[in-house]
Image: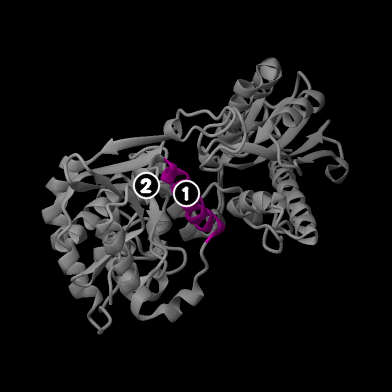
Amino acid sequence: MIISKTIFLDYLFCPKNTWLKLNKPELLDQFEISAFEQNLMEQGNEVEAYARNLFPGGVEVVETGERAVEATTRFMTAKAPAIFQATFIVDGFIARNDALVWDAENNCWDLYEIKGTNSLKEGGNDHNHIDDLTFQASVLKRAGITVGRYFLVHLNKDYVRMGTINVESLFLVEEQTATVIMGLPLVEEQMKTAKEYLTNKKEPVGGCECIYNGRSKHCTTFKYSNPEVPDYSIHDISRIGTSKKKLEALVESRIYDLADIPEDMEFSDVQMNQIISYRKQKSMIDIDGVNGELEGLQFPLYFFDYETYAPAIPVFDGYRPYQRIPFQFSLHILRSPDEDGEKMEHIEYLHEELSDPSPHVAALLEKHIGTTGSVITWNKSFEAGVNKELALRLPEHKATIDRVNGLLYDLMDVFKKQHYVHPEFKGSTSIKKVLPALVPELSYKDLGMKEVGQASNSWWAMLSPSTHPDVSAQISKDLKIYCGLDTYAMYAIWAHLYKMLR
């Protein structure tokens, strides 16, 4: 077994999950990579391709395995200015470098690791980035390569595209030599432990360490390794991942079902309401609280939702890396509480050409959203943020967009503020959890498009010249149904609450 930097980083996250992926790959057939994860990998490849332009005269190692090592040696002997995917295999470890750059002045090589993030701190991945670089430093040291400096390359979050991409401005290069050298002893100890663990043919006994994390930080094979944990468990308690001591105490006591949590254990009000609702299998409804939220709404009610695509490399002028392109919206308009919901006016827009949708979106908002009423969203900060970015790109529409943002109301607040707690919400305020509990006849289950990451990536695929017209047409249809359900679902939830108050 050869351990790559990817395997090593996976091991640091969850050793047993990594062992299972390597030794029982058939288990992975039970788990599907999400559209979001797939897109991250694809965008990472695109970022690396652009970053190579920082190193003129570079050559790429296209071979694999030992042949890649031989090609690397040939390029290094010839003192190539830069080598992409330089490969070293030593002591059971393999490193493929993003860019190994010759420093003629100091007669050594510099190592550059390219990351598709806007910041080294983004998403808490700074340690991963350094561990990645330090792992490669160890492999190169074992291979007898003299390395002078170590660098991380990442996207510049302040870069705004205007015309052709300016690669020098698109990326920031940060030296990490001192950090890598300081971290080398620990990483090499971890590499030794990882090698011993992962090459052991006997499956590790017991569960995995993810049992001490909240649900969002569980590994792919968590259910296999921890069969005693129910699908809805203590790991789903709201913000339990930030209550490490409570979670650890429950796990150490082998308490996984919310019904078994000791009565005297202290939790926040939000967490306690979730637990009580589950134990009683009854909703907890604060009628005054719900009424307080809804009574401030003014008709007409505009149920509004965006779908966006956020590419790592900006594709249109005026955009930064990972800035959201509002390619679609759905707008259901309820003129009065007595209007038949089935006959509501519905405006939908899907941009179906390879250009910036912003001017079309802004014009339609101005046309269809009046000066009075309430614009109802789910997770208001998202729509408000997209609108603010829209106004920056189109200052001529700023007054309209500011007006729309002034009318925004977040229907999710009813549930975030715990005016309505339902056991089937399972501690979540996602519309995909709230909708089936309150309006079971509506569902995302059978849609061609099921989640936001899939919708975002599908729009870009729909525009690709390589996509068959029939496939593009089906994507267009699925996107309209998906986004339309988002706003109709908001109406249906509002209607459920409104009828409850009457």
Report helix, strand or loop for mark 1.
helix
Give the farthest residue toward the bottom.
202
Quarter of the figure with the N terminus: bottom left
Q: Which mark is residue 49?
A: 1
Total count of labels: 2
For badge 1, the amino acid type reads Ala
For badge 2, the amino acid type reads Ile
Of 12 and 496, the residue lying toward us: 12
Residue 361 in picture, x, y percent from top left:
73, 31
Q: Sort mark 1 into few (<14), some (14-19) or many (20+) by Cα contacts within 10 Å.
A: few
Is 408 above or below relative to 458?
above
In the image: residue 281, left or right of residue 350: left
In the image: residue 498, left or right of residue 29: right
Q: Main secondary structure of the magenta part?
A: helix
Q: Which residues are magenta?
A: 34-53
In the image: residue 211, left or right of residue 379: left
Residue at the spot x=46%, y=60% of the render? 279
* Residues at marks 1 and 2, CA–CA distance in whole angstroms: 10 Å
Residue at the spot x=42%, y=46% of the render? 52
| Residue assigned mark 2 | 114
Q: Sort mark 2 into few (<14), some (14-19) or many (20+) by Cα contacts within 10 Å.
A: many
Residue at the spot x=41%, y=71% of the render? 223
Of 437 and 468, the residue lying toward us: 468
* Residue 401 sits inside the magenta stretch: no
- Using the rendered view, name the quadrant where residue 157 is placed: top left
Quarter of the figure with the C terminus: top right
Q: Nearer the viewer, mark 1 or mark 2?
A: 1
Residue 443 in picture, x, y percent from top left:
70, 58
Residue 493 in picture, x, y percent from top left:
69, 45
* Label whose residue precedes the other's in the sequence (1 or 2): 1
Of 467 and 189, the residue lying toward us: 467
